[in-house]
Image (spheres, grey):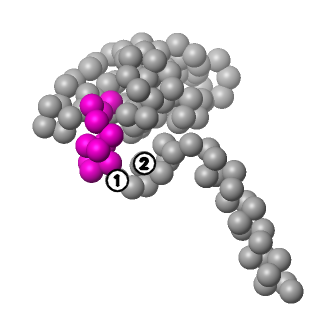
Amino acid sequence: MEIEIKKQRETPLLSRTRVTLTLNYDAATPNRLEIRKAVAHKVKAKEDLVIIKHIYTRFGQKMAKVIAHVYNDKKDMEAIERPFMLKKHSAKKADSEKPAEAAEPAKAASA
């Protein structure tokens, strides 16, 4: 996976930097968390301060345009970003617990 920064704009009032990148990949489109890790490495920021806003893929090409916000502070990020976007960027541990929880109510309903 190759990343190239196209634009980088500082937004001091929102305590963040908006970064537009071009992403070239080999197989399927990488998931949001993989892209987040690569963007954090590229812009030399902490991974938990990066939010991937948009991933625009190109039909028939192994290329995507990515728009990311890199925050200066976690407190500012939580105040500005919507809760569903913060949930999308949380670790996969929460997702692995959901199927077990969904199976338990189904067993209780059948008993």
Residue 10: x and y in percent read 19, 25
Q: Quadrant of residue 101?
A: bottom right
Amino acid type at circle 1 is Arg
Left or right for 1, reference 87: right
Does residue 100 lie above or below 38 as drawn?
Answer: below
Q: Is residue 40 magenta?
A: no
Residue 102: x and y in percent read 72, 68
Asked whether 102 or 32 is in front, the reply is 102
Q: Is residue 76 magenta?
A: yes
Q: Which residues are magenta?
A: 70-80
Left or right for 6, reference 41: left
Res 86 label: 2
Residue 65 seen anywhere in this rendered image of the structure: no
Residue at image mark 1? 82
Res 93 label: none
Identify the residue shown where x is 53% and y is 36%: 32
Left or right for 62, reference 52: right
Residue 23: x and y in percent read 49, 20
Amino acid type at circle 2 is Leu
Identify the residue shown where x is 78% and y is 76%: 106
CA–CA distance in space, label 1 to label 2: 7 Å
Identify the element where label 2 is drawn: helix
